[in-house]
Image (cartoon, helix red, strand yellow):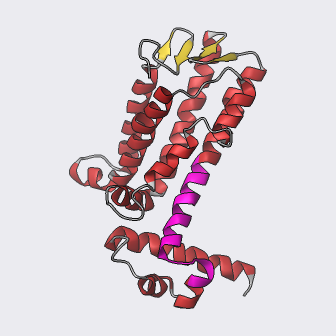
Amino acid sequence: MEKNSGNEAKERIIKAAIQLFSQKGYDATRVNDIASAANVNKALIYYYFKSKEDILDFMVQSLLDNAVLLTVDFIQTSIVQMVKNGEMEINPDRLHFISETAKKNFLQNAFKFYEKLIDYVIENKKIIRVLMIESLKKGKHQDSLFRFMKFLSGDEENPIIKTISNAGHDFVYSNELILFNFFFSIIPIVSFAAYFDDYKAVCSLNDDELRRSFLSVYEIIAASLISGSDILLKNNNINI
């Protein structure tokens, strides 16, 4: 099998699985259904994947890996570079900016990053909807959504934490920050993607208007974390 034709067939399998998982549900979709929709034989699916479960695991990992790449790129080009330039200091409970201009530039880059992230989840809204449904069931994949927690923890192998820590050794990923990022950052983004089409159906907004409205709300939330020349990473009045 030629490499290009093999990759093309694998892509068809993945796209077919996403479509079927989204339409019929993960449990109701059979491997035979995927083979038929992808126009491949069943044996080829098992050449690339051990099982239907393996297909979903592959989707989750790909989704997670790409989201991490986007995040690490933002950290490298914004946080790490600003620390090197002497424009930002990383403290255990906050990011401190040396000047108002530095803070403004960081926020502009942060909003651009968030916009890329939103576009990414909208593009992958079908698989995200599947993951959300599976996370609410008492099945094999109920912890799929919580795999994102791996990249919120203070684990030394966490590429996001390693990148930030290399720039500022005082950085502390507190329990409060992990909780905030999961329930007030990841879950809203996931929910937005999962219910994107449903929300559109009951409101008068088109795709672009809905996307821009969500981004505007994010800017309001982000502004609540700003205190003078700092972006707060922890509420020091709360002990967790």
Q: Residue furthest right?
A: 84
Residue plotted at (41% across, 48% down):
190
Residue 26 pos. (x, y %):
38, 71
Q: Quadrant of residue 139?
A: bottom left
Q: Residue at x 41, y 84 (%)?
A: 33
For residue 40, say whether it is visible: no
Assign the magenta stretch its main secondary structure.
helix
- Please provide percent x and percent y for residue 102: 65, 16
Find residue 22 and report its horizontal and vertical position in percent: 37, 67
**What residue is drawn where x is 60% and y is 30%?**
109
Res 151 → quadrant: top right
In-front residue for pair 139/77: 139
Left or right: residue 79 compared with residue 13: right
Is residue 170 in sight in this rendering?
A: yes
**Which one is nearer the viewer's eye here, 36 or 101?**
36
Range of the magenta residues? Answer: 46-67
Residue 215 is a magenta residue: no
Q: Is residue 45 left or right of residue 37?
A: right
Q: Is residue 175 above or below residue 66?
A: above
Q: Is residue 189 above or below residue 173?
A: below
Which residue ends up furthest to the left in the rendered image?
Answer: 202
Q: Is residue 75 above or below residue 54?
A: above
Residue farthest toward the front in the current orientation of the protein: 240
Residue 156 position within the rendered picture, expressed as x and y whole percent measured from the top left: 68, 38
Image quadrant containing the N terminus: bottom right
Query: Is residue 19 or residue 46 the one in the foreground?
Result: 46
Q: Looking at the rendering, in which quadrant would you find the C terminus?
A: top left
Nearer to me, 203 or 236: 236
